[in-house]
Amino acid sequence: MIIGIDVREGARVERAGKGEYVYQVVSELVQHSEHRFVLFSDRDVPKQWQKDNVRTVIFKTPSFIWQFLVFLQLEFIRPVDTYFSTTSLIIPALVRSTPVVTTLFDFVSFLFPSRHQQKAVVLEKMWMKLAIRYSQHLLSISEHTKKDAIKLFKVSPDKITTTYLAASFVQEQESITINKENVILFIGTLEPRKNIVKLVEAFNKLKTEGIHASLLLVGKWGWQSDTIKQAIEQSPFKQDIQVLGYVRAAQKQSLYKQSAVLAFPSIYEGFGLPPLEAMAMGVPVVTSNISSLPEVVGDAAVLVDPNSTEEIYSAVKKILTDKSFTEQLVAKGYIQAQKFNWQKTADATLGVLLGKN
């Protein structure tokens, strides 16, 4: 079979959650030499994808033009037997001549529009319904995302297959020095949905009690980040709050190793990779008791109401002060993280692409 894939996000050097998903799944898929792959990109693709059974189609154009050019290819030239739309809703909404499989990540635009970038809200509300209707099959990155799709768009459960994400770290390691003790780590885009203001409030309460700790926020500044900046600036302990910005993949392991706890009190996640990565690295996790996060962490993390500063504070405090409890949590975390791997994700994905779902 000839399988076309939108690999744009996975071909980026700096990859967020969606990009990591594309990179890992494509890296596994192209190993199947019995199939041919056409990788559609807007930039050069990683060397490990360049194989005898792989052809690349690269349009180095703005996104809208790229979408139009790929649409023309699929609708009229039909160079592939099936197309895997990893991050675009426009193409599956428009294409009729080529079967399309589309990945669903989350429904923030529909459930929490005020906490999401307005441009993304407009585009997703414009294209999501059509993409879901005309896709031959859908992949969801969690059972929670699948349930949201069924509830919001009345999709048949048989049309959606859940393919989980997994923790992964690059072979090349690069150290990064934090020079702080009892590091409370957050990783993710610094935006309202990630609930960082509540985390800062919980941190303030910890410090007021005299607990020795520091808060490390890792990630790019997102939209409407002024409230986060204001919360940090107004904290009486702002000297113990550090915003590190984007961290390269090679630095991730070093970062986790120097952290005492991952605090991830997000309001909504389609999956939530940082908690899984933290557990794989032996870092105890505090995360939200809503959306997909309980599904990801199981009983291997402390679950809290993300709207409760008190619960976030209490959970982090227990991990920082109760060594026996923390050791039990770490042991459970290792076991939980092993339940997820990219090979299983890619195998399930290939099965869907081949029509075996």
Image: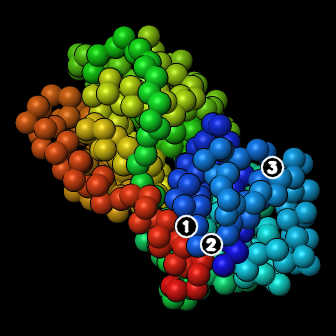
Three-letter amino acid code at disc 3?
Answer: Asp
Q: Label 1, secondary structure: give it.
A: loop
Q: Is residue 123 left or right of residue 226?
A: right
- Say which residue label 2 marks: 35
Asked if 236 appears above or below 92 in the picture, the reply is above
- Measured in 3D between alpha carbons, the distance from the residue under mark 1 to the one under mark 3, in whole angstroms, is 24 Å
Q: Is residue 349 visible?
A: yes
Q: Which residue is mark 3?
A: 42
Amino acid type at image mark 1: His
Q: Which of marks 2 and 3 precedes in the sequence? A: 2
- Residues marked 1 and 3 touching at CB (< 8 Å): no
Asked whether 244 or 110 is in front, the reply is 244
Q: Which mark is residue 32?
A: 1
Disc 2 residue type (three-letter): His
Label of residue 285 in the image: none
Q: Residue at x 58, y 73 (%)?
A: 34
Whether residue 25 sits left or right of residue 168 in the image: it is right
State the residue in front, 30 or 222: 30
x and y percentages locating residue 185 in the rendered image = 39, 30
From the viewer's perspective, is 209 left or right of 344?
left
The percent position of residue 116, horizontal first and vertical second, equals 65, 51
Query: Dot 3 surroundings within 10 Å: few (below 14), some, or many (20 or more)?
Result: some
Q: Nearer the viewer, mark 3 or mark 2?
A: 2
